[in-house]
Amino acid sequence: MTTEPMRSNEELIGRVDVRDLEAVFATVGHDDPGGHHAVADPCPADFTWDYEKGARPRLDRLYEKAKRAQWNGQTDLPWETEVDQERVVMQNQAANSNGLRWSPEDTAGTALEGWGDKEWLRLGVEYQNWLLSQFMHGEQGALLCTAKIVETVPWIDAKYYAATQVMDEARHVEVFSRYLDEKLSGHYPINAHLGLLLDDIIGDRRWDMTYLGMQIMVEGLALAAFGFIHAVTQEPLLKQMLRYVMADEARHVAFGVVSLQDYYAELSTSELRERQEFAFEAAVRMKDRMMMQEVWERLEVPSQDVITIMKRSPERDEFQILLFSKIVPNLKKLGLLDAADGWLRQKFTEMGAIGFEDLVDTAQEVDAEADGSPAVRHVA
Ligand SMILES: [Fe+2]
Ligand SMILES: [Fe+2]
């Protein structure tokens, strides 16, 4: 079997060098004037006449667990908690958890030169508003993608499970939106790179690409990001909210792994190559989004200055790579790292993320198999 000629970086991600920050900063997200964004969906809806429940036992088991794992975003979280956003940001900065305070050597000669506590605090506050906004938009992406999976996946056990995930994602959008409105100090439009990725996922005609893009890539990254913030934040409402959301997300990623494992075993090398390319493109878009272009624009910091600082301080890059720790093991389990002459292994090696390949995959995570609602399991 011969493999298709590799598509180049330029064809896949619109630039030759993954680390071309000028290109990354050239795309910035703005509000859609009408308040909506439409994406054409070419994927056919699929009726199955095989109603045998449990024909796919692992999906059936996840479905039964998901029914018992529901929680209520309105009544199960301590919304009465008073959140002093500036204090929270100062605590985070003291713990240096987001790395958003550069040294005078790093900022010399840029718009950030001479910044004092007040300016760094403003950056931290804007970053938090931006980050939670991106979580909210990503959750809406998950809501739409999972509704799409209900339509397009050919197996009844997967349609059943996906229906529970639709409910989970509705709850996630709801709680992030409420947190932004009641506890933080502003909203951001969707990051341009995240938006491109969600459009690609929804606009694909192959049903498994929804899973690969959302359950494996976007939700895999979210699981790691929520985990870091949950570990660091001392704000009790956010901490509990993230813990509950993570309990759901672990199940969602497991749903992706379990569904795609069998399907990918049947695909040809050239079909697997297409999946590898899609995963690589998604990984690059997710990494690009971490540059938080929209924050710098709002603070009127020229992107060239940010690029200068980023190049001087590669440790932030290393931190961002940690966010791929939940993705790479799952891609390995799906056989995508090593299919088609190991093309994707090579790409993740270049990105510096291949070291995570032997971490535990999400189908084996405790949360994915946990029984009962986190609200009664008293998860910590
Ligand atoms: Fe979610
Ligand atoms: Fe999810």
Image (spheres, rainbow, N blue to C red):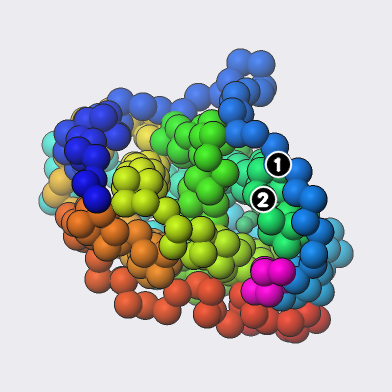
Residue at (70, 41) in percent of width and height: 46
What amino acid is labelled 1 in the image?
Answer: Asp
Q: Quadrant of residue 335?
A: bottom left
Majority secondary structure of magenta residues:
helix
Q: Quadrant of residue 323?
A: bottom left
Examine the structure image and report whether residue 57 is included in the region drawn in magenta: yes
**Mark earlier in primary sequence (2, 1):** 1
Residue at (31, 51) in percent of width and height: 269
Q: Which mark is residue 154?
A: 2
What amino acid is labelled 2 in the image?
Answer: Pro
Quick one: SS at disc 2?
loop
The residue furthest top is: 33
Examine the structure image and report whether residue 95 is included in the region drawn in magenta: no
Q: What is the span of residues highlighted in magenta in the rendered image?
A: 55-60
375 and 212: which is toward the camera = 212
Report if residue 50 is visible in the image. yes
Residue at (68, 81) in percent of width and height: 370
Could you tell whether 343 is left or right of 142 in the image? left
Queried on whether the Cβ of the residue with tag 2 lies below 8 angstroms from ligand 2, the answer reads: no
Dots 2, 1 in contact, CB < 8 A: yes
Q: Which mark is residue 46?
A: 1
